[in-house]
Amino acid sequence: MFGESVASWAMTDKQEVIEALSAMPENVSLDEIIEELGRMVAVRRGRAAIAAGRFKTQEEVEQIVASWFPNSSSQS
């Protein structure tokens, strides 16, 4: 929602939060702040998972999803 700084990789957690808060409008609600912090955590976890090799390629995901509906093309 409020974006992420290009230089965030070099900042401490506290600095990232301060920057995110600074980018928000003065009338931002506590719920919106919590949502943004949640997004920041999710992005960080996602990047860590990718760095650790815990991800699926587009093709792998397509095969997994297709396996959920093995006869879908023959049903009408």
Image (spheres, rainbow, N blue to C red):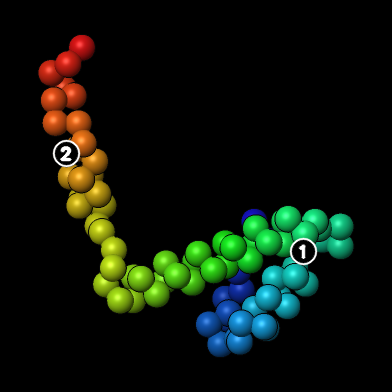
Above or below — where is 46 with respect to 63? below
Q: Residues within 10 Å of mark 1 (few under 14, many from 20)?
A: some
- For the residue marked with disc 1, what is the amino acid? Met
Q: Residue furthest right?
A: 26
Write the residue at 35% across / 71% down. 49
Lower sequence index among marks 2 and 1: 1
Residue 9's disc is: none
Q: Position of residue 28 (x, y in %)?
A: 81, 58
Above or below — where is 67 with respect to 40? above
Q: CA distance from mark 2 to mark 1?
A: 43 Å
Q: Quadrant of residue 32?
A: bottom right
Question: Quick one: SS at disc 1?
Answer: loop
Please give the count of numbered marks on the rendered protein. Answer: 2
Confirm or deny contact between disc 2 and disc 1 (CB under 8 A): no
Q: Position of residue 76 (x, y in %)?
A: 20, 12
- In front of the other: label 2 or label 1? 2
Q: Position of residue 62 (x, y in %)?
A: 23, 44
- For the residue marked with disc 2, what is the amino acid? Ser
Write the residue at 61% across / 82% down. 13
Is residue 3 in view from this perspective?
A: no
Above or below — where is 45 with respect to 67? below
Residue occupied by mark 1: 24
Question: Quick one: SS at disc 2?
Answer: helix
Q: Residues within 10 Å of mark 2 (few under 14, many from 20)?
A: few
Quadrant location, the N terminus:
bottom right
Write the residue at 30% across / 76% down. 52
Residue occupied by mark 2: 67
In this picture, residue 41 sits left or right of residue 57: right
**Along the line of sight, the residue nearer the viewer: 9 or 30:** 30
